Image: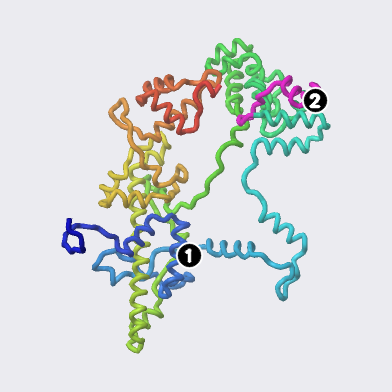
Amino acid sequence: MKQGLFQNQQMRQEMKLAPRMIQALRFLQAPWPELRELIRTELERNPVLEEKQGEGEATLPMAEPLTAAAFDDVDQENDFEPDDFGREIDALEKMLEPRPLEAAPGLPPPTAEAEEKRKYFLDSITAPPSLHAHLEEQLNESGLGEAAKKAGEFIIGNVDENGWLAADVAEIVREAGVPEPAVKEALAVVQEFDPPGVAARDLKECLLIQLRRSGAGPDAPAVRLVQGHLEALGQDRVPELAKAAGLTEAETAEALKRISLLDPKPGAKFSAPPAVYVTPEVEIRRTAEGAFVADMRRDALPRLRISAEYEAMLEDPETAEEARKYLADMVRSGRFVLDSLHQRRETIRKIAAAIAETQAEFFEHGISRLKPMTMSTLAERLGVHETTVGRAVSGKYVRTPQGVFELRFFFTAGLPTADGGSISTAAAKEAVAKLIAHEDIRKPLSDQVIADKLKAQGVPLARRTVAKYREQLGIPPAHKRK
């Protein structure tokens, strides 16, 4: 075999993204917080880019879409307007800056109390308290004696995530090492804590505590129904229930309505995941004519333009050639940033407008009317690549009549229905969750029963699919929901 260095020629096709195209894709994919940082970086890097200040200046036309022919003749302003966000951040940063106790010239020195309050504010925990922490705080203020307070601590420690007491009095006596009267005293006190119904040992006690806390006496119709006919409450047979309880049908119906407003799991709200705060950059609203339209919000990103001063320097024949070359590069780069922002805005607006048109029934009636929708079908409809839609909806949020959603939420596969139509997987999950929410907690529905009920409603789901959706919703199986 002959060894050595050789040269040969070959042809092959290869696609490479230009740096500016990569920048445009980065702008398209970036959510608002990241996009703000990208814009700030461009403002610092490019001296010919500037943020428009004030409201009295004339608005120039919006930038043209990015094309090779129009690249050198792009409008000099995008369509964003400044808001108070930057000023709020500046104020917060100033407050967070360490400062000495001595005051600035002309200002009185901050007092030790003021500094302590400031430190407390900065060190404060904003996360909501857990159920156990909430109960322990009330226990510390209850005034119980030493033995009863110790028993109360063990009681709170045995309260499950739903707010029910998962241990009986004998167990608490054994674990806490205190007399039974102290345990009973502590239990009676803890059961008066917030939320109403907490530390109940079964459903009946949980409901009775809430009724008593709401002012219902021992002879109130709702109390009589819960006390003596709890098993029959879920059957919705008012005449039979009224006869068995010795009440009129009107009293029974009113009592059932009152019972339905009680919370069988008073502690569950404390274990709910914390709210996530996002910034919607598009809003879908209903017009006076009843149609749903999409509007881009104009209140988060700075409004940019090319500096007129630098443009004048570029046109001035007395400007040095080297400086003219630099300014020309910066102007082209700045105009590309403006054009990329415009392209991003228009892409998101078109996608949101298509969603507003397609999902009108969802915005009118809720998730049960969410229609199947895929990125590929929308991309074909808009004449763009599927990956463009994917980048545009990633991390972008929309405010709608049904709440705030990520744009990606509206893209879901469809399941066939008995009438030949289709239902989105999100709507199918909602149907599963709704059946479980209205089940008799004494006889939870199995996955097969849920599948049978949905099939009767025209939504044929297999038992395995129901189990998968239930797990994705974070709902335990039937034997754990009793």
Question: Which residue sits furthest front?
Answer: 1
Picture quadrant of residue 112: bottom right
Q: Quadrant of residue 169?
A: top right
Give the residue type at disc 2.
Val
Residue displayed at 77% across by 64% down = 111
Q: Residue at x 56, y 21 (%)?
A: 482
Q: Is residue 320 left or right of residue 433?
A: left
Q: Is residue 248 left or right of residue 212?
A: left
The range drawn in magenta is 160-183
71 on left or right of 466: left
Can you say whether 449 is above or below 100 in the image?
A: above
Look at mark 1 in the image and give the residue it sits on.
82
Q: Position of residue 437 (x, y in %)?
A: 51, 27
The answer to whether residue 222 shows anywhere in this view is: no
* Place of residue 148 in the rendered image (x, y in percent of width and height, measured from the top left): 80, 29
Q: Find residue 194 and report its image quarter.
A: top right
Q: Which mark is residue 178?
A: 2
Decide if residue 340 is in sight here: yes
